[in-house]
Amino acid sequence: MSEYSNPPQANLNPEAEAHLSGPLFQNALKTLNEAAKVVNCDPNILVRLQRPRRCLTVSVPVRMDDQSVKVFTGYRVQYNSTLGPYKGGIRYHQNVDLSEVVGLAALMTFKNSVLGLPLGGAKGGICVDPTKLSRAEKQGLTRRYTSEISSFVGPTKDIPAPDVGTDQQTMAWFMDTFSNEHGGFAQPAVVTGKPVEIGGSLGRNHATGLGVIYVCERAMEMNQMKMQGSRIVIQGFGNVGSFAAKFASERGARITAVSDVSGGIFNGDGLNVPELLNYVKQTGAVKGFPNSQPISNADLLELECDALLPCALEGQIDTHNAERIKAKIIAEGANGPITNAATKILDKRGIFIAPDVIANGGGVIVSYFEWVQDIMSFFWDEQDVDAKLKGVILKAFDNVYKLKQEKAIDMRTAAMAAAVSRLEKAMLLRGLYPR
Ligand code: NAD
């Protein structure tokens, strides 16, 4: 306990704090507060960790194809930079609002901390349905958003990356706009998740799915199970889910069911994953894949299996279905697929959860590698990137598992406890007490 034994009181004007009331952020705060108790976190440090440092809201005018001007609302939330420059993705989605971005920025802070990266946490977004924009409109939107936040980001300040609704091309436009506005010199290290041709990293595209499988394999070992011959069920067959399926089947697992927004497919003997990947490339969905039976997304989650990998959306397992989940292990590929209350039920039932902040950390770990490579202007081969990813993600996972055992707590609380502990030490060393 420090010399400041009474934590300062927060401002309780509800309007001033409306952006702190979103469900995602409130859920994160619950875990944060529980974890802070476990590691006996100084209340003066905790009160700082419960608030974002900086929330930026910008207007983004775009000339549409019909020559009219539409103004979109964009955000960049810089949550905490104790451990290094801010880092976090940019989301284009019609549900984006400041409270969601605050929640996502907080999660990035704890994720980067538990993974041992020298990075703070941030997130950005624009409230827009990107599927309704033409390529030219999306480019215009990205370039103007970049200009609006440009004095707050940079290779040593805040390094964005892709998230839902944004991709490599979006990052290329972001990097180009930022570089042109800062002297016209190429500054690849301002964003990650870029195309390889302009400073992206090999291995970035499959990094999250591969990380999920490294973690799942280690969780199986810890529970006296083996990936070889195991039955795995995957919800979501986008970037994360499809690469997780590929890497698990290459390790001898049977992928018995997968799903996407069109529905699910099941084959108890295991789906042929290489053929499925080709099928999805051609048809755009898993539905109708030969040698499979249809299954609903709800039934898929409740299938008997060794590992369940939710790789689609948040809130998929809650108090309504937690009692019926039959997987032995759940590795969270998506962000927040299991609610807080469901975590407690699953934990009591002996189901092992590899929490999202570690299990899907492969993306930000290789983003960190991309940033390092850009700064060095020296690029690594894919095997090197994959091996380094394995080292970082499993080190974090093993540390969290040790803490779980020592303190007899669930993995999600343990992951947050490890994150808080590292942030607290750094804040004390830097003297970041509120004064
Ligand atoms: P994506 O858009 O590539 O894929 C999402 C998949 O989920 C698609 O197959 C889609 O059809 C499916 N889906 C959507 N609604 C569904 C529903 N109701 N039921 C079943 N499936 C549904 O996205 P992604 O990049 O694979 O991200 C998936 C999740 O992983 C998100 O929560 C994202 O935040 C998280 N994540 C992604 C990365 C990354 O590097 N891509 C990193 C960390 C976390």
Image (cartoon, rainbow, N blue to C red):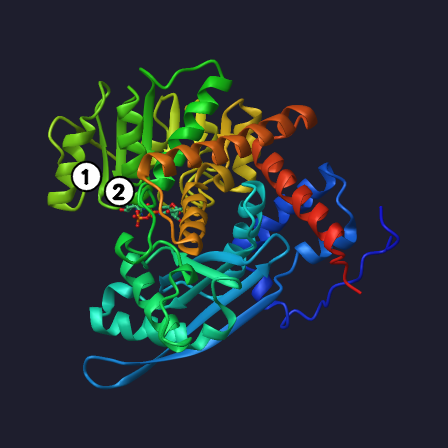
Q: On the picture, is 50 further left or further right than 138?
A: right
Mark 1 and 2 residues: CB-CB less than 8 Å, in contact? yes
Q: Within 8 Å: ligand 1 and the Cβ of disc 1?
A: yes
Q: CA distance from mark 1 to mark 2?
A: 7 Å
Q: Please name the residue shown 52% across and 59% down the image.
A: 122
As displayed, is residue 179 above or below residue 401? Answer: below
Circle 2 sits in a helix, a strand or a loop, which is it? strand
Callout 1 crowding tier (Cα within 10 Å): few <14, some 14–19, many ≥20 = many
The foreground one among 243 and 256 is 243
- Look at mark 1 in the image and give the residue it sits on: 286
Please provide percent x and percent y for residue 429: 74, 51
Q: Closest to the observer: 404 or 115?
A: 115
Residue 246 position, x and y percent, is 26, 31
Q: Is 148 or 101 nearer to us in this picture?
A: 148
Is residue 319 visible in the rendered structure shown here?
Answer: no
| 69 left or right of 21 in image | left
Quarter of the picture holding the C terminus: bottom right
Q: Which residue is mark 2?
A: 260
Residue at the spot 35% in from the left edge and 42% down from the top edge = 380
Above or below, 281 against 348 in this view is: below
> Residue 428: x, y in percent?
76, 51
Q: Earlier in the sequence, mark 1 or mark 2?
A: 2
Element at badge 1? loop
Amino acid bearing label 1: Val
